[in-house]
């Protein structure tokens, strides 16, 4: 089983290194790794954020463990050369259309949430985000209006097949959990969202056991902080999912705690923490590696069919937190290495 390790920029290599230490401790037969540059680091070395050799490795690998991309030194580059284009390119080239972002508060972190503890402790949900469509991949550009003004445009679109396949992922995820699915859109304003809602309703006929509800995205953002316990699984488009999943991370204590899986139709996936490259703390040992370690657990569960090992990692993280392990984002002083050590001590 080949794992591609793509550390990327900023704190990405630091957190991926800690996740690899945890994976190594499990002594999984046949698991081996290859590393490659991606993002700003790849641009500086080769002139492109997603070099051919990196893409080739990603295609050959059984799964990808990804750190983060983003480098202020590259902000002035043309858009197609910016570090962030690497992750968009991987999603598109590998057809990673379904992003799963679980958000659950570890009881020990109730005081780290932006919400009152009695509200924060309710959150236990999965956001299913479509990754290959929407404004991120639609036609975009800058044009000149008739009166000579610059005008930027980004086209949002989904076809019914794209909606249908992500809706099925949402329903299947709900079937494995509490059998509640909330579809988030803006159907009162956007034609794209009206199609989204229509197709989701059509797919719901195949899942009569799942209670389907619909919510406008602005209300969903409000409800996440008002009553997060009402949500079991949420399915939504690329743009809305990007925003709502980051919001959910702060409800759960810290953006440094949430893992994610980006999957194709055959469960091959790219696994990454939802936080960014955090260049302001890169190289200082302040990064929280737990989201990446939990992403590695998702990798074992979804792409490698090693649920027992995934459970062991998740249990070790919970025990490490219960034992007082806290990185700076959680109000503590543990370094990335210290957090990795704390997990390793609890790993059975």
Image: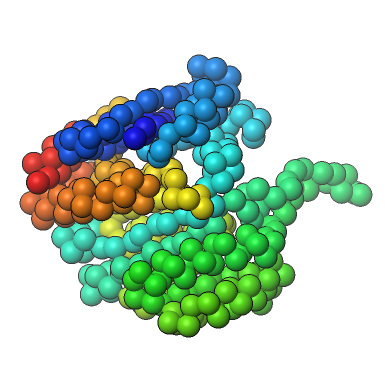
Give the residue drawn at x 36%, y 51%: 302
| Residue 52 location (% of width, % of height) | 56, 24
**In which quadrant of the rendered view does residue 211 lie?**
bottom left
Q: Is residue 258 above or below residue 164?
A: above
Colour scheme employed for the rendering of this structure: rainbow
Outermost residue, front direction?
A: 30
Q: Is 289 in front, or is 222?
A: 289
| Residue 126 location (% of width, % of height) | 38, 64
Give the residue drawn at x 39%, y 72%: 175
Instruction: Name the image quarter holding the N terminus.
Output: top left
Outermost residue, top direction?
A: 45
Q: Is residue 81 visible?
A: yes
Q: Is residue 31 above or below residue 229?
A: above
Q: Is residue 200 above or below residue 113?
A: below
Q: Is 313 in front, or is 30?
A: 30
Q: Is residue 335 visible?
A: no
Give the residue drawn at x 58%, y 32%: 82
| Residue 226 location (% of width, % of height) | 38, 76
Q: Is residue 313 above or below residue 225?
A: above
Give the residue drawn at x 29%, y 63%: 104
**In the image, 96: left or right of 107?**
right
How many numbered marks have been drawn onto this rendered protein structure? 0
| Residue 157 location (% of width, % of height) | 70, 59
């Amino acid at each position: 089983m080949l794992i591609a390790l793509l550390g990327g920029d900023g704190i990405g290599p630091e957190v991926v290194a800690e996740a690899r230490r945890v994976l190594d401790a499990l002594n999984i037969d046949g698991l081996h790794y290859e590393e490659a540059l991606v993002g700003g680091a790849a641009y500086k070395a080769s002139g492109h954020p997603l070099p051919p050799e990196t893409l080739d490795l990603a295609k050959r690998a059984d799964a990808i463990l990804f750190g983060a991309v983003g480098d202020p030194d590259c902000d002035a580059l043309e858009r197609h050369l910016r570090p962030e284009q690497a992750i968009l390119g991987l999603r598109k080239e590998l057809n990673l259309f379904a992003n799963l972002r679980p958000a659950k508060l570890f009881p020990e972190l109730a005081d780290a949430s932006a919400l009152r503890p009695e509200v924060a402790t309710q959150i236990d949900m999965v956001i299913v985000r479509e990754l290959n469509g929407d404004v991120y991949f639609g036609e975009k550009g800058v044009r000149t209006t008739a009166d000579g003004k610059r005008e930027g445009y980004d086209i949002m679109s989904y076809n019914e097949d794209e909606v249908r396949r992500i809706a099925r992922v949402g329903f299947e995820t709900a079937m494995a959990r509490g059998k509640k699915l909330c579809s988030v859109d803006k159907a009162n304003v956007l034609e794209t969202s009206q199609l989204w809602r229509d197709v989701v309703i059509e797919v719901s006929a195949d899942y009569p056991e799942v209670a389907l509800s619909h919510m406008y995205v602005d209300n969903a953002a409000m409800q996440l902080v008002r009553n997060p316990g009402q949500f079991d699984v949420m399915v939504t488009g690329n743009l809305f999912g990007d925003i709502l999943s980051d919001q959910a991370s702060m409800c759960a204590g810290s953006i440094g705690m949430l893992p994610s899986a980006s999957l194709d139709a055959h469960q091959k996936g790219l696994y990454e923490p939802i936080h960014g490259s955090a260049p302001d703390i890169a190289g200082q040992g302040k990064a929280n590696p737990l989201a990446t370690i939990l992403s590695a657990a998702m990798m074992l569960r979804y792409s490698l069919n090693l649920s027992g090992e995934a459970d062991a990692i998740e249990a070790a993280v919970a025990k490490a937190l219960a034992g007082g392990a806290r990185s700076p984002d959680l109000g503590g002083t543990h370094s990335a290495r210290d957090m990795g050590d704390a997990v390793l001590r609890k790993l059975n």
